[in-house]
């Protein structure tokens, strides 16, 4: 658990459960913490036993009791040595109870939540970097992990579970840090992980096909994201219009909202000028409120202009001046595993990127094409036990966006890599430009071996990840290390 590693859990004044909701907790029970994980229960904790996909928390009740649980909340009452309470869907209550126990930490923070299919990690990183450059103590919660001041710990998921999230927010607040930016995933919204959160500001990047194994339809996916943009969770919104779902959201939103666009001058904020040069982009941003922000942006990728614009507006709305933001832009750096350059002195370019949706693959390869004089050689796989419907779309994006397309394995999990590859290549004519190499390490070596001066090898899908999950086992595998080793073999 992230919090145990950071080891800064704030002290909680014990509270009586019935004070939270006497209809549910119809007995006075003094608690000083809670967890949905029986192994993380401590003396005086409330254990919230949830139904999971493979097991039920109640199966681990005895472990929770041994660890010090003083009460259990689940979807049904049970005979136990500790008081038992029931609620039809206890997951809905975890965040609210945790927020109550930790004295509503989000209300004491200037918090920003960013959601969307792509761009969450980079946008949140840019926001935190701008705050840090301007000496504003800040924290970040996201895909890469949790940063509290100078402390960083790798995370398990984009948005922590509700009990962990409120604890982290309490840690942040107790350290005297005022600003928090975090990624908010659609799973987190749907699974009530952000209950008890109240953001000063929420941002929408874009929406494209992903996670339909979970949401089933794009409308469901969109409607889930939309829940964040209500008074239940936020005070103000920033919405990117350069995506059909952004335009839909702006019409639907029920809180004050400001729109952003790379080129639409009807938006509240937009780019007045974008000039690409050898060092990135020279940019000028303007707003209908009179803001003028400019600078030299030294991060690759046209789509990162969208991430920058969102970060600029979020920084402005959280109190920074135009001059503070302008002077910060040239100091921004890219995120680990996002268009990350790998340079070992080779005569061709090499880039690692996290792109794992059809839209992201298309956008990354399109960007790479703008600075590549030779061929684009791209390597991509699709994860197992995830949205199967996007596999042929990703395969098509790979083949169309590159001169040499190498189809390989990603994190197959419990699926057969060969079947995933068949799903990716169905209906495609690979001819002389498409190659199927199941072993990811061999695929990387193949691409580097065939790269010529001025070519660019693009390794997609895993980005910052340092492992490959196969049949329930995560084996060490870092794309950045693997491509470095492959380059050294052919130099």
Image (cartoon, grey):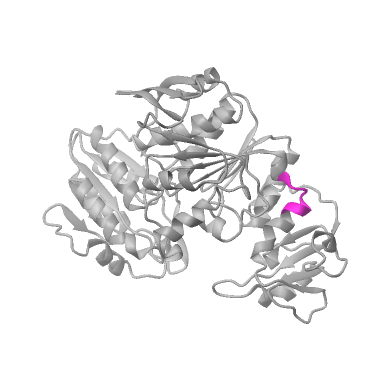
In the image shown, does 95 or 1 lie closer to the viewer? 95
What residue lies at 50% left-to-right and 56% top-to-bottom? 224
Q: Is residue 347 visible?
A: no
What residue lies at 33% left-to-right and 49% top-to-bottom? 359
In the image shown, does 239 or 356 lie closer to the viewer? 239
Indicate the position of residue 351 as horizontal and vertical percent values.
32, 40
Left or right position of 117 against 164: left
Indicate the position of residue 419 as horizontal and vertical percent values.
29, 69
Indicate the position of residue 123 as horizontal and vertical percent values.
48, 38
What residue lies at 56% left-to-right and 56% top-to-bottom? 188
Left or right position of 162 against 43: left
Numbered range of the magenta stretch: 99-105
Rendering quarter of residue 87: bottom right
Left or right position of 191 against 74: left
Pick the quarter of the image with the C terminus: top left
Indicate the position of residue 308 as horizontal and vertical percent values.
44, 32
Left or right position of 366 against 166: left
Q: Furthest-left residue in view?
A: 431
- When the figure is inspected, residue 183 is found, relative to residue 330, above or below; the finding is below
Q: Is residue 10 visible?
A: yes
Pick the quarter of the image with the N terminus: bottom right
Rendering quarter of residue 384: bottom left
């Amino acid at each position: 658990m992230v919090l145990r590693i950071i080891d800064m859990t704030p002290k909680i004044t014990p509270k009586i459960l019935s004070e939270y909701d006497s209809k549910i907790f119809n007995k006075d029970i003094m608690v000083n913490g809670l967890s949905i994980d029986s192994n993380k229960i401590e003396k005086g904790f409330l254990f919230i036993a949830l139904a999971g996909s493979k097991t039920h928390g109640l199966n681990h009740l005895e472990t929770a009791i041994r660890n010090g649980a003083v009460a259990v909340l689940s979807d049904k009452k049970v005979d136990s040595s500790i008081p038992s309470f029931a609620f039809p869907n206890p997951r809905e209550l975890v965040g609210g109870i945790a927020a109550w126990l930790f004295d509503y930490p989000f209300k004491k923070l200037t918090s920003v939540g960013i959601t969307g299919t792509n761009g969450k990690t980079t946008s949140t990183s840019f926001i935190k970097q701008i705050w840090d450059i301007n000496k504003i103590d800040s924290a970040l919660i996201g895909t890469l992990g949790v940063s509290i001041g100078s402390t960083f710990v790798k995370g398990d998921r984009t948005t922590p579970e509700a009990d962990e999230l409120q604890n982290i927010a309490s840690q942040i607040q107790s350290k005297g840090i005022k600003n928090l930016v975090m990624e908010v995933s659609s799973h987190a919204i749907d699974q009530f992980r952000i209950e008890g959160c109240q953001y000063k500001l929420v941002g929408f990047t874009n929406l494209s096909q992903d996670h339909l194994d979970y949401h089933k339809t794009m409308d469901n996916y969109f409607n889930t994201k939309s829940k964040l943009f209500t008074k239940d969770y936020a005070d103000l919104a920033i919405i990117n219009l350069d995506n059909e779902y952004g335009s839909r959201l702006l019409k639907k939103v029920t809180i004050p909202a400001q729109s952003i666009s790379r080129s639409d001058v009807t938006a509240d904020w937009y780019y007045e000028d974008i000039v690409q040069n050898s060092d990135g982009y020279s940019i000028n941003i303007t707003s209908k409120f009179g803001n003028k922000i400019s600078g030299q942006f030294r991060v690759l990728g046209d789509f990162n202009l969208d991430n920058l614009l969102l970060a600029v507006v979020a920084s402005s709305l959280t109190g920074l001046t135009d001059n503070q933001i302008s002077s910060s832009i040239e100091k921004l750096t890219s995120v680990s595993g996002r268009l990350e350059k790998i340079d070992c002195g080779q005569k061709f370019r090499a880039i690692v990127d996290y792109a794992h949706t059809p839209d992201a693959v298309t956008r990354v390869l399109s960007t790479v094409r703008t600075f590549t004089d030779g061929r684009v050689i791209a390597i991509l796989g699709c994860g197992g036990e995830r949205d199967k419907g996007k596999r042929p779309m990703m395969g098509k994006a790979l083949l169309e966006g590159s001169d040499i397309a190498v189809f390989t394995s990603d994190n197959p999990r419990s699926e057969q890599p060969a079947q995933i590859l068949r799903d990716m290549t169905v209906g495609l004519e690979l001819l002389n430009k498409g190659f199927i190499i199941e072993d990811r390490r061999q695929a990387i070596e193949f691409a580097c071996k065939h790269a010529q001066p001025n070519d660019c090898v693009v390794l997609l899908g895993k980005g910052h990840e340092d492992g490959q999950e196969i049949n329930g086992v995560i084996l060490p595998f870092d794309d950045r290390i693997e491509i470095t080793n492959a380059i050294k073999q052919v130099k």
